[in-house]
Image (tube, rainbow, N blue to C red):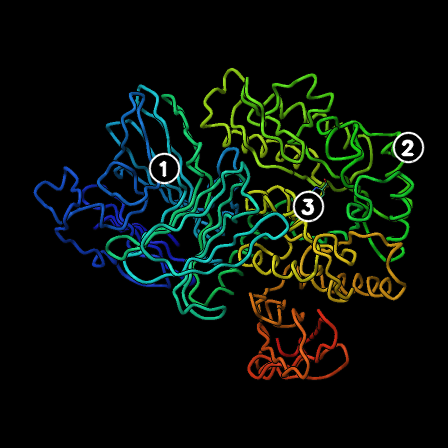
Amino acid sequence: MAIEFQTEGRIFTIQTDATTYQMQADTYGHLLHLYYGETAAGSMEYLLTFEDRGFSGNPWEAGEDRTYSLDALPQEYPTQGTGDFRSPAMAVRDAGGVWGCHLRYQSHSIRKGKYSLPGLPAVYAEEEEAETLEIQMEDPDTGLAVTLYYGVLPRLDVITRAVKAENRGNSPLFLEKAQSACLDFLAGTYDLIQFYGRHAMERQFQRSALGHGAAVIGSRRGTSSHQYSPFVILAEPDTSENHGLCWGLSFVYSGPFKAEAEKDQYGQTRISMGIQDEMFSYCLKPGEAFYAPEVIMSCSGQGLGRLSRNFHKTIRHHICRGRWKLTPRPVLINNWEATYFGFTGSRILEIARQAAELGVEMMVLDDGWFGKRDSDCSGLGDWQVNEEKLGCSLAQLSEQIHGLGLQFGLWVEPEMVSEDSELYRKHPDWALAVPGRKPVRSRCQLVLDFSREDVVDYIYEQISRVLRSARIEYIKWDMNRSIAEVYSAAADRQNPGEILYRYVLGLYRFLERLNREYPELLIEGCSGGGGRFDAGMLYYTPQIWCSDNTDAMDRIRIQYGTSFGYPISAVGSHISAVPNHQNGRVTPMETRGLAAMAGSFGLELDLDKITEEEKACVRRQICQYHQDWNLIHNGDYYRLAAPEEGSELAAWMFAAADGSEALAAAAALDVHGNAPASLIRLKGLRAESEYRDEEGRIYSGSGLMRAGIPLPRFREPYGSWRLRLWEVNHDENK
Ligand code: DGJ
């Protein structure tokens, strides 16, 4: 069993292949955290130290014992009001406005398989692959009952956490904060690694030493956001790509979140993650329950690379679902950067015809095909095909595209409404807006109230009608603004503190229904590029458009940051035109292709404007992608050289888990005269094997991994390099 309970001392121990997690329900019923790190045996209760510390709160049960204080002890799920003055995981207020809640252990259960959460995405697994621990806690004063969930996937070194809060009392309770996971570290110095950004420059790597004073990141935008990713890493200062201890936390949720890390007065570190508590206040009526979404945790004693691979495998195999989870995704062309809103049906067909000649497999029609939508100022909410603009019905266009041998995909933005739309004129109260106040506009649009079931159902029907009307194999689900007005006009949803949570539940309900009713449909998530790139969305959409920035150099940096927490298969990535539309940079087609192939590959440009030579390059790259797809999506990913500030090279590679084949790639971020040779060391090969490249050259695995390989001298800006390797005599070496 991965989960064990030792009755003496009431100690819970979770063992994964390479890590141990331990906690104790002590004599007072407080759930104390004992350890999370590389495999360790035995009870670690001895780690707890007790001192009489000035100004420390002592719980009533401790009587005269002033050495027992929750302000200094490591806890599993700290609540506000217990004399622990660090940031709590949960804060509760009763109907009279009184704050505080003091949870004590009641009981627990251990079972095979992985728990699930109603209405929320969560890691799933076969009975044999996972175990679940549920710990019941209760506060007799408020009547609040809390269940702490732990899901264990031993082979992946993953432990998931989630929380259920139930009101077993007689009057309403208000959850003012409800985090999903909290980790207390007794000692040590740590760096916090987080991924900040902005529209068109998402998930930039930042590593900073944690000191006293909280480091807090999160989103107040209604979505997980471009600005901070709901994925963070705590690492020991000497931890690098391949060595050292680190812990990752990934939030399986697509709404506002908060991650906090703080070194306390005694040098102990607390990190927590969960729903953003600003604008959150959830009313639990007697008998009601609330679920705090899941956090996936992993610990690696072998550096950041191993930590990322743990998350990649977990998300790829235990978050992503359905038909497209592990099957090759079609190489698509999207018309957005080729035409923006200015297209007709015949222009789309022309793009499709040219794309088919290059080996593209799907044509995606982006924004502008419906309602009155020739710019971003109108039409959202009116999901009726604009046949006048297309010159035919959607079914006819789709059939013609299929006639060219391509599948057909469509852009939608279901959560939005334009004020200039039939829908808004009919239902102005369906938009999130405060009565009597002027709403904040963003991209000229308002957000539909997805906390309301009637709104979600109506939009579902509209989109579903379109999907039924033509052969559509893919949709791109876009979301192009943040939520500013947190107010619902629905009479039964007047508590503004619940709206953002209920909005996300409404979004998930829509997506779940779509997945169930259209199991063959490939859905790509998008929010102005990568503004909602999180493990929650990946439960419904196995790939997400990673950024609106399609410049190869910026993309390499964005994809580098993204790779720490999310699998390569999740990254929607396209070749686009030069000069690039976002930053004007000119990069070679070869490099653009290489960057786009580190993801779910596609094209997004006017094929009339590229040379025959470039077309030949794209054709070749599509063939390479077909050949390498399995390695790229299902192989192990290694970061070889980081495209950080000031570095001149980015390099990465994919290796089959058994070392039988590999693909390494590098791109020059800068060029200099008389430059020294760049040498990179490969990873994931078998040291004792030999490898053959595409030209038939033979290398030893040990040489490539220990001595490295020199890259060719790049004589043009932004040049790139690729090395495909096959193990010689693979079958005999097995
Ligand atoms: C934002 C997306 O990220 C783009 O790719 C494109 O689909 C536009 N929206 C369309 O409005």
Residue type at mark 2? Cys
Residue 335 appears in the picture as rendered: yes
Give the position of the C terminus as an image quadrant.
bottom right
Q: State the residue position of label 2.
A: 392
- Which quadrant of the structure image shows residue 670? bottom right
Numbered tag placed on residue 719 in the rendering: none
Q: For numbered disc 3, what is the local secondary structure?
A: loop
From the viewer's side, name the closer residue of 88 and 669.
669
The image position of residue 229, as x and y in percent, is 52, 49
**Is label 3 within 8 A of ligand 1 (CB to nearest ligand atom)?**
no
Q: For numbered disc 2, what is the local secondary structure?
A: loop
Q: State the residue position of label 1.
A: 147
Give the position of the N terminus as an image quadrant.
bottom left
Residue type at mark 1? Thr
On screen, residue 697 versus residue 638, left or right, reads right
Residue type at mark 3? Arg
Please state the quadrant of the image where ligand 1 appears. Answer: top right
Q: For numbered disc 1, what is the local secondary structure?
A: strand
* Residue located 59% across and 61% down the image: 560
**Is label 2 within 8 A of ligand 1 (CB to nearest ligand atom)?**
no
Q: State the residue position of label 3.
A: 323
Of labels 2 and 3, the one closer to you: 2
* Residue located 71% across and 29% down the image: 380
